[in-house]
Image: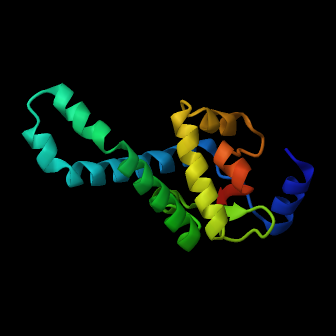
Amino acid sequence: MNEEIENTLHREGLTLATTKKRAVAFFIDEMLLSSILIIALWNSFIAAQTMEEIINVTNAFVLEYMAMKIIYQAFFVLQYGASIGKLVMKIRVIEIKTLQNPNVLVSLNRAIFRIISEMFFYLGFLWGMLSPERQTWHDKTASTLVVDA
């Protein structure tokens, strides 16, 4: 682990969130957002006659769903330092330099690069599992860490 980060975390009494906690938080957030999408498109899903029509309905709203995920992540990380999943798992996002909740630009950067990581087969998340600082691509680009709350 980066010695400077390790010293800062130790000095402030912070510990990095485990990969398991982060994975469960991710799952909670994905289920929440997927449920909202299903509710919003319920009438279209009911009207669909075949699996192909259901897939077409889903594909028609990919950009809207991505925008919803970016807004959700950016808003909650900005306001609370954590998404709903992270709040449930008692973990939070902090900026490395300030050790505070990320500001608007950092939160937005993190949310956008999170989507990019998902688009590239979740490789950014795998990167975080292998990184000593447990930093995903979106954490690296935003200079953030996820710590126990």
Quadrant (top left/top right/bottom left/bottom right) for the C terminus: bottom right
* Residue pictured at 61% horizontal, 32% vertical: 123
* Residue pictured at 81% horizontal, 65% vertical: 97
- Residue 50, can we see it? yes
Colour scheme in the image?
Answer: rainbow
**Residue 49 falls left or right of residue 108:** left
Q: Nearer the viewer, residue 40 or 24?
A: 40
Q: Nearer the viewer, residue 72 or 101?
A: 72
Quadrant (top left/top right/bottom left/bottom right) for the N terminus: top right
Locate residue 18, reporting x and y percent: 64, 47
26 w.r.t. 71: above or below: above
122 w.r.t. 136: above or below: above
Locate residue 64, reporting x and y percent: 36, 51
- Residue 136, can we see it? no
Q: Quadrant of residue 56?
A: top left
Locate residue 130, reporting x and y percent: 71, 33
Q: Nearer the viewer, residue 118 or 146?
A: 118
46 w.r.t. 71: above or below: above
* Residue pictured at 66% horizontal, 36% vertical: 129
Q: Disc count in the image?
A: 0
* Residue pictured at 50% horizontal, 61% vertical: 83
Q: Nearer the viewer, residue 52 or 22?
A: 52
**Residue 81 falls left or right of residue 35:** right
**Residue 59 falls left or right of residue 75:** left
Locate residue 48, reporting x and y percent: 11, 36
